Amino acid sequence: MSPRAVSEETLLEAVADTSRRQVLDLLLAHGETTPTALATELPFTRQAVAKHLAVLDRAGLVQSTRQGREVRYSVRPEHLDVAIRAMARVAARWDARLEAIKRISESNAAARRRPVRR
């Protein structure tokens, strides 16, 4: 299945939260698990875990499967790759912006060091 189109903003919002990154890390470590099992390893409730999983699901980063009364979650590696590429694009844009700020700052500093001619 190919990754569904999810906005860069949605992906970034999903992984911006430290708690959601913890949930993702645990899912990556466990492969597939339930919100209840995740909550035993996290400093927040099962309900909070379920809410974080819902955000990650909307961003396409996790998938759920129902097994009887249980809902099991796992990471969608192909969608995680899309998120990584989106974050790399954002990082590249910020690197370019920061480089421009650095050049301006260095130029201003050099101008202040030049002796004033009268």
Image: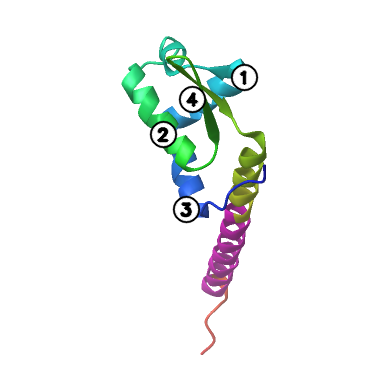
| Residues marked 2 and 1 touching at CB (< 8 Å) | no
Q: Residue 16 placed where, x, y %?
A: 45, 40
Q: Is residue 93 magenta?
A: yes
Q: CA distance from mark 3 to mark 1?
A: 26 Å
Secondary element at tag 4: helix
The span picked out in magenta is 90-112
Q: CA distance from mark 2 to mark 1?
A: 17 Å
| Residues marked 3 and 2 touching at CB (< 8 Å) | no
Q: Is residue 83 above or below residue 39?
A: below
Q: Looking at the rendering, in which quadrant would you find the N terminus? A: top right
**Amino acid type, label 1:** Gly
Q: Would you name the residue on which mark 3 appears?
A: 9
**Amino acid type, label 4:** Gln
**Amino acid type, label 2:** Ala
Q: Would you name the residue on which mark 2 appears?
A: 54
Secondary element at tag 1: loop
Judged by depth in the image, the label closer to the viewer, 3 or 1, is 1
